[in-house]
Image (cartoon, rainbow, N blue to C red):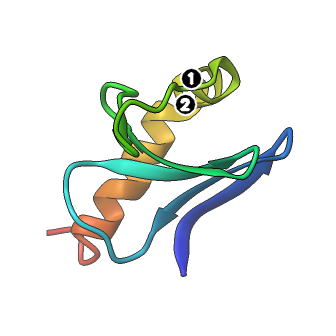
Amino acid sequence: MAVWNETRNNIRYKIHDVDHAPPHCHVVCKGRRLKVSLETFEVLGPSGAPLPSAVRQYLKENQLAMLQAWQRVQDPDGL
């Protein structure tokens, strides 16, 4: 399952409902899988992979909502 699952311009963005810190999302772009920090937009994996500008723009536009979704994953009871 995913708490965030959206495809825009053939790029898929996901936040899994069970995941580990730091806050991040999974992106599939042009057949490549990236793990990207929701706080800094740094590519966490694979190491050295560039972040496409379309992905950066999407993350900037949706950062607050995605961080809120991440928080729900970490604290599902709202404690």
Residue closer to the observer: 4 or 31: 31
Q: In this picture, is 25 found above or below 16?
A: above
Give the residue drawn at x 33%, y 68%.
Answer: 73
| Left-right relation of 44 to 65 | left
Give the residue drawn at x 43%, y 56%.
Answer: 69
Mark 1 = which residue?
A: 56
Q: In this picture, is 25 found above or below 15?
A: above
Q: Position of residue 40 (x, y in %)?
A: 32, 25
- Find the residue positioned furthest to the bottom: 1
Residue type of the residue flagged with mark 1:
Arg
Task: Give the number of marks.
Answer: 2
Q: Position of residue 4 (x, y in %)?
A: 57, 60
Quarter holding the N terminus is bottom right
Mark 2 = which residue?
A: 59
Q: Are marks 2 and 1 in contact (CB under 8 Å)?
A: yes
Q: Position of residue 14 (x, y in %)?
A: 56, 59
Real-space CA distance between mark 2 and mark 1, rounded to the nearest whole angstrom? 5 Å
Give the residue drawn at x 44%, y 34%.
Answer: 64
Residue closer to the observer: 42 or 78: 42
Task: Tell me where residue 16 sits by quadrant.
Answer: bottom left
Task: Tell me where residue 59 sits by quadrant.
Answer: top right
| Left-right relation of 6 to 56 | right
Residue closer to the observer: 18 or 28: 28
